[in-house]
Image: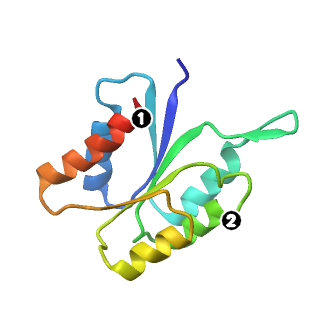
Amino acid sequence: MKETKVLLIEDDPDHADLIIDILEAENVNKEVILMKDGREAINYLQKTYIDRGNKIQSQIYLIILDLNLPKVPGMDVLKFIKQNSKYCSIPVVILSTSSDHKTLGEAYKNGANGYITKPLIHEDFVDKITMIRNLLN
């Protein structure tokens, strides 16, 4: 079975640790790669594509993207991903504290494949991430 790589772009270390623990739980074929700011994520994406003949392929199966990031905001990272033919086919799920309808609409307009508001209650947060993990199985 091919290893599943998830790119997690999250600057909050507590959220990142929790998300990684849940996504990698009970599955040795899943790797979560953490980027802590938007610039780091863009640089990583530009380096991860492997040219196989004339077809450029990524090893990334899913991107989980926070919107409130240092250096380059998450919405700009989303635009970069979805406006570039090399990356646009990678599904992007926004995981943000913002539940504002304007932000949600902008995310979908810019190509987000899903939008999850980070719950304030720990158990609810775990449930949301577990739901994402189950989709990867």
- Residue at image location 45% in from the left, 23% down from the top: 29
Say above or below: 130 vs 72: above
- Residue at image location 25% in from the left, 49% down from the top: 128
- Percent of width and height locating residue 41: 55, 57
Count of numbered marks? 2
Are there few (<14), some (14-19), or many (20+) residues within 10 Å of tag 1?
some
Label 1: element kind: helix
- Residue at image location 25% in from the left, 54% down from the top: 14
Residue at far right of view: 54
Mark 2–mark 1 Cα distance, whole angstroms, equals: 24 Å
Q: Quadrant of residue 58?
A: top right
Residue at far top of view: 1
- Residue at image location 52% in from the left, 26% down from the top: 3
Left or right of 116: which side holds 6?
A: right
Res. 92 visible in picture: yes
| First in sequence: mark 2 vs mark 1 | 2
Q: Amino acid at mark 2?
A: Gln
Q: Which residue is mark 1?
A: 136
- Percent of width and height locating residue 94: 42, 60
Label 2: element kind: loop
Are there few (<14), some (14-19), or many (20+) residues within 10 Å of tag 2?
few
Are the residues tagged 2 and 1 within 8 Å (C-beta)? no
- Percent of width and height locating residue 42: 61, 59
Q: Amino acid at mark 1?
A: Leu
Residue 83's disc is 2
Res. 73 visible in picture: no
